[in-house]
Amino acid sequence: MTHPLLSLQGLTKAYPGVVANDQVSFDIGAGEVHALLGENGAGKSTLVKMIYGLVKPDSGTMLLRGEPYTPSEPRQARADGIAMVFQHFSLFDALNVAENIALGMENPPAMRDLASRIREVSETYGLPLDPYRTVGDLSAGERQRVEIIRCLLQDPKLLIMDEPTSVLTPQEVDILFQTLQKLRSEGTSILYISHKLEEIRTLCDHATILRLGKNVGECVPAETSARDMAEMMVGTALQTPERSGRAFGDVALDITGLSVPAPSAFGTALKNVHLTVRKGEILGIGGVAGNGQDELLGVLSGETLTTDDAVKLEGAPVGHLGPVARRRLGILAAPEERLGHAAAPDMSLTENAMLTAATREGLASRGFLKWGLAQEFAEKVIERFDVRTPGPQNAARSLSGGNLQKFVIGREVLQSPEVLVVNQPTWGVDAAAAAAIRQSLLDLAAGGTAVICISQDLDELMEIADSFAALNEGRLSAPRPTTGLSVDEIGLMMGGAHGMEVAHV
Amino acid sequence: MIRLEKRPQPSRVWSMATPLVAVLATMIAGGLLFAALGKNPVEAIRTIFWDPLFGEFAFYYRPQLLVKGAPLVLIAIGLSLGFRAGIWNIGAEGQYIMGAICGAGAGLAFYPADSALIFPLMVVAGALGGWAWAMIPAVLKTRFGTNEILVSLMLVYVAEQFLASVSLGLLKNPEGFGFPGSRNLQSWDAAHNAELITGTGMHWGVVAALIAVIFAYVLLNRHMLGYHIRLSGEAPRAARFAGVNPTRLVLFCLGTSGALAGLAGLFEVSGPSGQISIDFNVGYGFTAIIVAFLGRLHPVGILLAGGLMALTYIGGDIAQSNMGLPSAAIQVFQGMLLFFLLALDLLTNFRIALSKPEVV
């Protein structure tokens, strides 16, 4: 028996207008942690969906332990010992952990038995979790544990994990890695999808790199430099953003003692937030998703109004001003959610240019809109930020996530803001475009703009931010200069590992 | 196997073509229905769509087209602004009634004076009446978060009771021999919304409807307020981000649609109908909802849809009396029109793909 656990041979899947996977072949051995590496849109998701039975390949074959394997639905894949932890959790906030897990089972046992099995598995693998807690109260890391335990209860032979660390603090990542290593030592194979190179280097035995749907190379991550892997992913040499020494000016924006109640039952309240950012400074705000990032952006953009002097621009109170008035003063923002918040999906790019640029770019006079100027502005954004689209008359939702992100950031950057607030500026953007966006933020700061960059990508913040603060359950830590800040310190600022205290029982 | 694939962006061709295709499909399916009833389908379709415009008695029906179309268009234009923004005023019928009562009441207070100011006063009072009635759901929504669909709809029935009450009491004609209903405004020149050009059906309501179409077109395409209305409907969160004040938008949309419905009521009571009576309202306020969607919430589309709707009403009446078609068949026919339109609407955002069933 020398068959690999799972062997993919020439898998091809085409969607209208795009070939998601083109003749992809590789093997996953038993007890191997296999990394699937690639940029957004490289075809990683399509590939694992085929393995998990969500998508049927157009051609190619899969062999499971040497036998032909053609799952027609996830249930069949699970029966064959393949489990998957998705990037986006499918959990019900209002139910408790055990109830959520029971919902995903074919024949759920009695709740008490299930709870004891959950406890057993969670202790065996060092994933502390109380089966009776309501999911709505859990942190992102804990929710992920629910999904992982749901998979482990099926005793899988192959566990697929789709970008599992994107929602975790560094300490939580450590816990997760220990769990995965324990699983590997027990002979479970893991297919690990990520574009974070350092963690792949520490965890994975083998890596397959996808680019534009094709398998462009394999490597042993521990023996390959992160830079080499990145260049395989991107296909070209990477440009690192340049940061030149900058002198900071006066305080541009400051927030003192800001508290805002949570906007909804599962939103986050902001608690006594203090923040100062000077002209020319980039303040990076880290933290695990759902700790008040959206709420903080709302307070800065003017979507959430506060008392007058909770938010001050150059000493003048602006807390009571709405988004339009703030834009007039030069406070611009780019929210995280591109479709539906930063841009209207069914409107053209020209109309979306009007969305935030009407005031500063003079696209309207006495309430009447100047569509010609709006189109020129949209074209300028498209050209300067290399947005790939046939033209400004195309609907926002026809753009890929990364291209729309470039448009959304470019729209604000080109309005020459006094203060720019961005949330997850490079989320879902390919490496080359991410570098371009970061460079534009650095250039803006060099020109004297105060930039607040909220992000969950710590590498990004370390690369561009001058000072760093972290959001944890609506509280903002005191900002510290990024130079000389260690990963451990950052992790502690982010609140350490949620539930760490019971991690090693 | 037939599958639906989402288009990367809405198809312009289909968004223009669906109303026409829907009308054609209605003609075919309606023709089959009429044939099944034992009537000549070609003749029935011709009676409905051709005779009112070009038939022997078209000189009589063409003015009717304007008389019936104008209130539909006027109300639908107002409704479409709210619908675009996701604000659902279902109570235009009630606002139409209240506009008529307020307008007629304001005029009748000066009976039998003869002043050129009376009719303009009635127009203002009619608009205000509809506006005020629509402000009830608007204020309740903005202050207490009530659902405007339910409140505006229920206020229709309140308005109907109010209409019956004033027909029997406050506005009852003192010289009407005890019959319910107000004085007939048609026989009082100062208050009569007469035909502007004799024999055309063109009255002030038609003029107002055309002005409303132009106004709405400019608002939606060239003005910030119209842009904010569209934005709120398509992406509420993006609208907040753009700086739209949702409260003000609700007040504007409900207020405008109420005022336009009120105007339609006033022009009707002072013109074609002539008097306030218990059965004054004939459902224009509800039909206008269909007209608004049939015209895909676009001002020019609504103008055409209003005309088409009026045509099927008049043509339907002719078919009933000339061919003996049951009125239920005519209503089914009109229902089909909306049904096909909504069904074909799908093609704007989706394309139909034929594919072989995947082998399991």
Image (cartoon, rainbow, N blue to C red):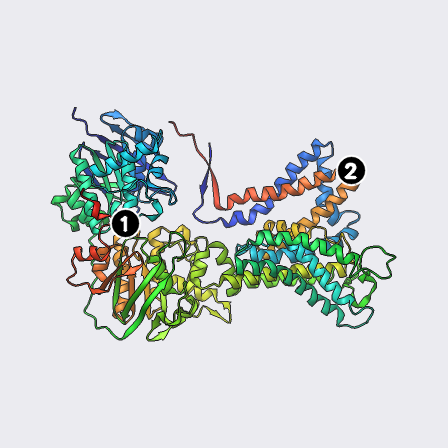
- The local crowd at label 1, few if under 14, some if 14 to 19, many if 20 or more residues have their Cα within 10 Å, is many
A465 versus A290 height, above or below: below
| Parent chain of label 1 | A
> Which sits in the foreground, B67 or A328?
A328
- Judged by depth in the image, the label closer to the viewer, 1 or 2, is 1
Q: Are marks 1 and 2 on the same chain?
A: no
Looking at the rendered structure, the kind of residue marked 2 is Gly
Which corner quadrant of the image does residue B201 belong to? bottom right
In the picture, the disc for residue B261 is none
Residue furthest front in the image: A112
Position in image of residue B237 (x %, y %) = 44, 57
> Which sits in the foreground, A79 or A214?
A79
Mark 1 and mark 2: Cα distance apart in space: 71 Å
Instruction: Please indicate, yes or no, whether residue A32 appears anywhere in the rendered image.
Output: no
B93 versus A17 height, above or below: below
Looking at the rendered structure, the kind of residue marked 1 is Val
Position in image of residue A110 (x %, y %) = 34, 31
What residue is drawn where x is 78% and y is 38%? Answer: B323
Numbered disc 2: secondary structure: loop
In the picture, the disc for residue B324 is 2
Q: Tell me the residue that label 1 is attached to.
A: A167
B291 versus B187 height, above or below: above
Position in image of residue B293 (x %, y %) = 59, 50
